[in-house]
Image (cartoon, rainbow, N blue to C red):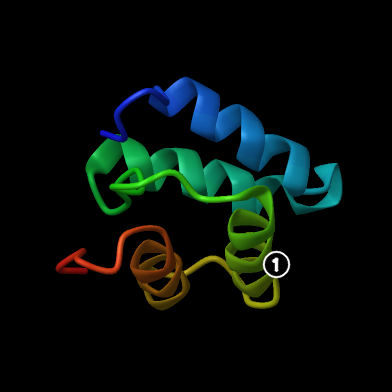
Amino acid sequence: MEEGLPLSALLARIRKMVPRSDDQHYDEIVRSFGVGALRSPPTPMSDRELARAIAEFLKEQPSSESVATLGRRLDPSSPV
């Protein structure tokens, strides 16, 4: 987990970037962190970097492929 930024704080930042109309995307992000498919970034991400990763994720339906792409954006060392 990212030092200095608990998962709850990261999810709060993400929640602000995901429109309510895309709740299924947000729910998939939360689920993916819960099952270990997503990991917190090893180093802090700027709002711009995080927003870019989230915007890319929102372009597609939530799936294992879109979660894997998001995972690589959040943590480039991720094995996903």
* Left or right: 61 as drawn, with respect to 77: right
Residue 58, how many percent across, how many down? 68, 67
Q: Which residue is mark 1?
A: 55
At x 36%, y 63%, the residue is 71
| Above-or-below relation of 1 to 19 | above
Which residue: 45% across, 66% down? 70
Look at the numbered disc 1 and give the secondary structure of its residue: helix
Question: Which residue reaches farthest left?
Answer: 79
Q: Where on the picture, by quarter, is residue 31?
A: top left
Whether residue 64 is situated above or below residue 3 in the rendered picture: below
27 and 7: which is toward the camera: 7
Q: Position of residue 78 (x, y in %)?
A: 21, 64
Asked whether 54 or 59 is in front, the reply is: 54
Q: Quadrant of residue 55?
A: bottom right
The residue at 74%/48% (across/down) is 18
Q: Quadrant of the N terminus?
A: top left
Q: Amino acid at mark 1?
A: Ala
Question: Where 63 sits versus 6, above or below?
Answer: below
Image quarter hosting the C terminus:
bottom left
Left or right placement of residue 63 versus residue 35 in this view = right
73 to the left or right of 21: left
- Of residues 70 and 25, the one nearer the viewer is 70
User: Where does the image place residue 5, in percent across and percent down from the top left?
Assistant: 42, 26
- Tally the marks: 1
Query: How many C-alpha atoms fall within 10 Å of the one at disc 1: few (<14), some, or many (≥20)?
Result: some
